[in-house]
Structures are given as structure tokens and as C-alpha cells.
Image: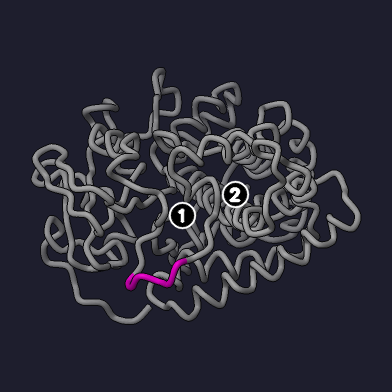
Amino acid sequence: MSARPPVTDWANDFDHLDSRWIEDPYPIWDRLRHSCPIAHTERFMGVYFPVRYQDIRTIAYDTEHFSSRRIIVREERPPVLPPAPPITSDPPEHRAQKTVLLPAFTPDAIARHKPRTREICRELIKDFSGRNGCDGAADYAQEIPVRVIASMLGISERAGEQFRKWIHEVLELGITDQAVLLRAIGEMDAFFAHEIAQRRAAASNDLISYLVDARIDGQALSDEHIIGTLKLLLIAGIDTTWSAIGSCLWHLATHPDDRRRLVNAPELMPTAVEELLRAYAPVTMAREIVKETQISGCDFKPGEMVLLSFPAANRDPAMFPNADRVIIDRPENRHAAFGLGIHRCLGSNLARMEITVALEEWLAAIPEFVLGPDQPVRWSQGTVRGPRQLPIVFRS
């Protein structure tokens, strides 16, 4: 990324691409929470950033003043992009577009993918045999959701590198480089158009065939609708989950007491996963302001954007006692890692399953590990946060 003007006033000139924000945003959010709970910047053509749980919740549920038609803050406004239903949809269209996907993401439907997920994790760990470490992000966390989503879509798992390239271009490079963004979108459109044509010629038992056969109010989905939804499932189903898995491994590598406790008491895994999701929620979504309104004394101007930081909501001490502490047996945990409002994550059952299986298999095979001393941890830039480089050393 090219050099950016440094931030000297987080309340009035924040930049979520600033290296300090990328490395460790939590102290910044905490200072804002006590001094200016709704920050603003003129960068990115004007963006608001609430940091309190209640304000974020209020905006997430307010579809009258805040639209989902733009969900990523970019340096310049791109030309009108094809929709990615249902995440870019507003009422009344949103409900039907989300409902048509629900059968594929029920707990029972996701349970059918659990054995393959476990096989994938074991295959990856087997590749570490004879090694004293690995990149926990690139070699493990990133591989799992890529292969699981490919399996669900009926696409070769060998397409993973291509998927990773597109995600990097759309969610990171494309924030500041419109040409990269549009090229990646064009490549994805062509890729999925080909897959749809194949399913129309010969259907199979996969998610693409399901969408080809799906109906809303008796009408088949258009190719544009299906392609948009597939791009959503690819990007949202991969980057968010690999970021969460990587953050979990980072925490366990740097908090040996939690790691050993989880190894010795695996029954804590469900509550531990929820707490790690709360503490290291990966996703910040954007909304476009379409009607002037006021929240907590702050005027929101139409045409500007709002970053809905569910990670910041999860660190609000007004909602979570000891919010900056990871408590793996936290008894009550109504976190917002999967979002709030009508766009709450459709794939939460899938993400929970993948994270749980990934940690179970890793800890069973590699109970002792630390961060490697020779290379730094590198975190992603943009609105999905997770380690992109995570050097790990195995300990006997």
C-alpha cells in the first residue's frame, strides 16, 4: 500500500488503513469510546465510525436511513457494481433473497460438511510432519474455508489460490485501486457464469445447482442474481472464517494458560469459540446514509458512509464486563461477531463448525506452540481483520 497521510486526530480524521489501526485497533477504539463515541473522517469521501454497541446496533437495525447497497468503504466511488444478494439488498427484497438460502445453511445442512472439514484439517496437519513450525495463516487457517466452500459449491478444491487472489483484490487492494477491483469482479463473474452454464446443462448435488433450481415467488433466479450470491458466498464464506481461525491460533500461541486449559478441558470448546469470536470478531460492514438522521447527538449526512464495526461493539465494556479480557468460560456472551439486524450472518453455523473443528484438530495434534521469533505477524488491511502471516513454532 502506498504511503498515506498519518492520522493525528482519530476522532475527526480516522483512517482504518493506517498501520497503527491495522496492527492493534483496540486501544484506538477504547480512546474514542471515552472521548468521541462516533468518529468522523473526510477521507474515503466521508465516513462515520461509531464504537459503542448500542449505537452500532441502532444503525444496523435502521434500514430507513442506512442502506446496504454499498457495504465496503473505498477511496473513490466505483461505478455501479452488480448486486450481491442478499447482503447488498434492502427491504422489502432482502427477506426473500435471504430466505431462499436458508435451507443450505441450517445446522443439519452444515453438519453434513463436518466430516470433510475434519478430513481437510487432518490432511493439512499431516503436511506439517517433520517440520518444526508453519505459517498458521497461509498453511492452515486460510486453506480450511477455501476447501470447504469449494466442496459446497461443487468446485475443485485446487481453485483455492484463485479464490485467495480475488479476495485479496476485492477486500484489500481494491479499496484504493479501482482497476484491480473491477478486474477481479470481472474475473469472478466469468468464472461463475461458466459454472452456472455447466449446471444448467447437467445439474449436480451442490450449492450452485441448488441456486439454479431455486425460486422466489415462483420465478427462477437470474444469472446476475446467482452470480452475485455466489460471489458473496465465496468472499464472505472464506475471508471472514479464515480470519477468525487465524486470530484464534494467534491468541492461543500468545496465551499459553488458555491454550493448556482448552487442551486439558476440551468441553470448554463451545464457550471458548464464542469468546474468541467476541474478542477477535473479524468483520466490519459499511452502510450508505440515504436519509439524514441523528444518533447520540451526531448528525449523519446523506451520501456519506458508516463503518459498522462489530469488533468494536464486542469490546464495549457497557455491554461486556472486562471487555478487553478473553475469558474462555464467559457465562453470558451475546456478541455481535456475526452482525446485528437483518443482515446477521447467514453462514454463522458454517463458521462456528469450521472454527471448532479447526481448533479441535490443531490442539489434538499440536498442543504446544508459540509465535515464531524470526518473522512478524502481519494483519490484513481493510474491513475484515485477521492474520495474513502467522509464524508458529511447534514445541514438544
Q: Residue at x 56, y 28 (%)?
A: 269
Going from the N terminus, do you reach mark 2 or mark 1 first? 2
Residue 33 placement: quadrant: top left
Q: Is residue 125 visible?
A: yes
Give the label on residue 237, or none. Answer: 2
State which quarter of the image contains the N terminus: bottom left
| Location of mark 1 (residue) | 386
Of residues 220 and 65, the one nearer the viewer is 220
What secondary structure is found at the residue carrying circle 1?
Answer: loop
- Can you say whether 225 is above or below 348 in the image? below
Secondary structure mostly seen in the magenta stretch? loop
Image: magenta residue range: 75-80
What colouring style does the render use?
Answer: one colour
- Can you say whether 203 is above or below 310 in the image? below
Mark 2–mark 1 CB contact (< 8 Å): no
Residue 341 position in % (x across, y down): 40, 33
Q: Is residue 393 visible?
A: no
Of residues 370 and 114, the one nearer the viewer is 114
- Can you say whether 279 is above or below 329 in the image? below
Give the label on residue 395, or none. Answer: none
Q: CA distance from mark 2 to mark 1?
A: 14 Å
Residue at the far top in the pictured view? 331
Instruction: Identify residue type, mark 2.
Output: Gly
Mark toward the viewer: 2 or 1? 2
Would residue 122 appear left or right of 61 to someone viewing this image?
A: right
